[in-house]
Amino acid sequence: MRVLIPLPIALPLLAAGLSMALHRRTQAQRALGLIVLTASLASTVALLVRVHAEGPIAVHVGGWRAPIGITLVADLFAAVMLVVSAAMVLVVLVYSIGSPRTADHALFFHPLYLILAAGVSSSFLAGDLFNLFVAFEVMLSASYVLITLGGTRDQIRSGMTYVVISLLASTFFVTAVGLIYAATGTVNMADLAGKVGGLPEPVRNALGLLLLVVFGIKAAIFPLFFWLPDSYPTAPTPVTAIFAGLLTKVGVYAIIRTQTLLFPSDETGSGLLLGIAVATMVVGVLGAIAQDDVKRILSFHIVSQIGYMIMGLGLFTVAGIAGAIFYIIHHIVVKTTLFLVGGLVENATGTGALRRLGGLLHRAPLIAVLFLVPALSLAGLPPFSGFVAKLALVQAGMDAERYFVVGASLVVSLLTLFSMTKIWAGVFWGRPEEDPPLVSARGDGRLSAPRLMVAPTAALVAISLAVAFAAAPLYDLSRQAAEDLVERTPYIQEVLGP
């Protein structure tokens, strides 16, 4: 069963090469991508079942055991992230096939998309810091091209900001890896778990802070989020959706992995993370309220919602980390859905500017329904998945007596609801202040969208509802993953041996 671990990496990489060989055969590229990503999803589900039953699994590439060789490790946290990410990648690929903007660049889109999928999976499975760096670079190299796909002036300008900031973060990352190796003689995370604690406290704190900055840039936490709201809205909708749903969560995953495994927090570290969480929540939601474009509002909400995940980690309790993991599951699905709905609005009207939209509730009622469910979930209203996720974090915060943080999270939830109401009123009610770009959107007739864009969006709405209905078993799974993260011993013993 260990062969399941490299499959989510190897299958998309091999398919990317074959997709490049199928130059100008778009239908073949699409079929190949769908088949391979479906197989990848199946392998991640099987891996999750195996890990849930038997505990963490490690594969030593080439037979070279840790800490010398390359190790791929799947514990319950990694396996859950693999399943959710594989499902999102597959659904968004279907959406992209129906999207006119990506269809125009399909020859390059499909190979790059498969490379991105491989990089995301590799990030979750990497057992050492250097190969985590390599996985990030594989993912980011594909994202540099995808975010500028189409080549409009605003898109290239915003894309260059994303590229420069990502390269700067990568420079910090490889520097941190070198410093950690110089201090401990290893970069294997299981091996580091035993050696970092023996370092002098100033050195240990400096290395922990450096990694937090590196992954914080990628996760878009306060004050390192400034690149995201300008970079994401200009990219094609499928690209923006997968970036919003997954790429920042890879950064959050890396923060949770390194902070729990390498730097189990004391009171000072917990206070720092909780302060970052509150600032991220508040600044993100205030930025969202100030915007007048659908994608820009949703982009600022990515920042705001990252704060909830860091809040769960900052509590450094099993309940807090479990709440953070459940929140990540919920947010990946909901945020991806909202950006796909934003793409449906743009496809029907030619714009996402609120002043040029209005009245879509009567002209495109299906789009309105597809927006309403994830919007209410993002705001945390019952009975949707966002309510369950926020309730878990609030309960964990109350148990830890972090009342100020809990109060801030509740206020941000109310402001999130307000900003979602702003989109609802601007897009689906009233009348536009200015005419939308598309002539077909200026009359009173019904607006439609391609079925291959509507169907995957509806599928994600159904998945978000399923997350709410299956909240109890999913939270139990998240709690078990959190217990393994706090315990650390099963992970370390699987990699290094008893």
Image (cartoon, helix red, strand yellow):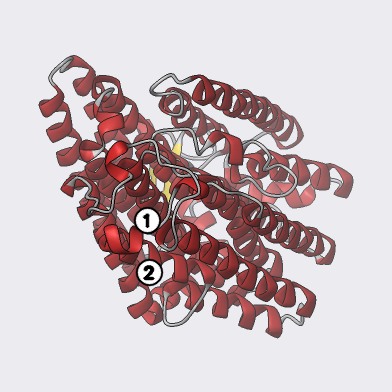
**Residue 174: x and y, percent?**
65, 27
- Nearer the observer, 32 or 439: 439
Residue 364 visible in the picture: no
Q: Secondary structure at mark 2?
A: helix
Residue at 56% from the left image edge and 74% from the top image edge: 390
- Apparent side of residue 428 relative to residue 319 in the rendered image (left or right): left
Residues under numbered marks 1 and 2 in contact, where contact means CB atoms less than 8 Å apart: yes
Residue 370: quarter of image: bottom left
Residue 18: quarter of image: top left
Residue 7: quarter of image: top left
Q: Amino acid at mark 1?
A: Thr
**Residue 105: x and y, percent?**
28, 22
The residue labelled by disc 2 is 373
Q: Residues within 10 Å of mark 1 (few under 14, many from 20)?
A: many
Task: Tell me if residue 300 comes above or below residue 477 in the rendering.
Answer: above
Task: Tell me if residue 480 comes above or below residue 57 in the rendering.
Answer: below
The residue labelled by disc 1 is 337
**Residue 465: x and y, percent?**
33, 72
Q: Amino acid at mark 2?
A: Val
Q: CA distance from mark 1 to mark 2?
A: 10 Å
- Nearer the observer, 318 or 113: 113
- Apparent side of residue 329 relative to residue 413 in the rendered image (left or right): left
- Apparent side of residue 346 relative to residue 259 in the rendered image (left or right): left
Residue at 72% from the left image edge and 37% from the top image edge: 184
- Give the label on residue 389, or none: none
Residue 216 visible in the picture: yes
Task: Tell me if residue 397 comes above or below residue 443 in the rendering.
Answer: below
**Residue 164: x and y, percent?**
63, 23
Q: Residues within 10 Å of mark 2 (few under 14, many from 20)?
A: some
Q: Earlier in the sequence, mark 1 or mark 2?
A: 1
Residue at 33% from the left image edge and 32% from the top image edge: 113
Q: Secondary structure at mark 1?
A: helix
